[in-house]
Image (cartoon, helix red, strand yellow):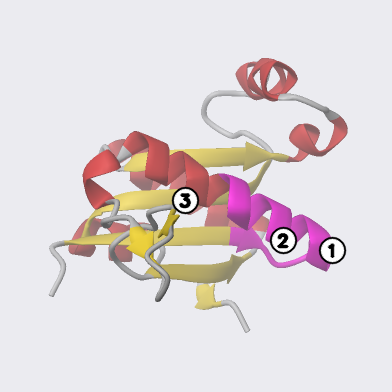
Amino acid sequence: MFDTKVAILVRDDLAMWQKLNVTAFLATGIAGAVPDAMGEPYRDAAGRPHARLLGQPILVFAASAEVLQRAWQQAIQRDLTRSAYVRAMFETGHDAANRAVFAAEPADAPDLVGLALHGPKKDVDKATKGAVLHP
């Protein structure tokens, strides 16, 4: 049904609140980067408008540090749309600080705790190889 796929990989050793926080932030990154992936606004039975959601499923995976690094490399090689969350972002309190700590990470091997990908199905599947659906 969809030519593209959205996948979020989250470190499997994070606390639950961290997993949820990372997943939420990464999903907004994809929504912002791929506006065409957004569905139409929702309306409830009273006709009140509600925000749009991504128009396709998002698969959430648990991944080790190694799997995240492999996915990072694959995503760059395949030019997938990506949003990333590094461990240092847990210590910041606002977007500018998040961008600063992200920019300070090694470009080829950031300390990833989460990664969201959007792109052609086969490319996202290759990038997420080794990750398992989050329980």
Residue depicted at 21% across the width and 45% down the height: 36
Give the residue type that dot 1 points to.
Answer: Ala
Q: Which mark is residue 15?
A: 1
Span highlighted in magenta in the image: 10-25
**Vertical position of residue 9 compared to residue 94: above or below:** below
Secondary element type, mark 2: helix
Mark 3 → mark 1, Cα distance in angstroms: 18 Å
Image coordinates for residue 77, horizontal then vertical, percent: 29, 38
Give the residue type that dot 3 points to.
Answer: Ala
Residue depicted at 61% across the width and 56% down the height: 23
Q: Which residue position holds label 2? A: 19
State yes or no: discs 1 and 2 in contact (Cβ < 8 Å).
yes
Give the residue type that dot 2 points to.
Answer: Lys
Mark 1 → mark 2, Cα distance in angstroms: 6 Å
Image coordinates for residue 101, horizontal then vertical, percent: 72, 21
Image coordinates for residue 64, horizontal then vertical, percent: 65, 63
**Figure disc tally:** 3
Q: Which residue position holds label 3? A: 116
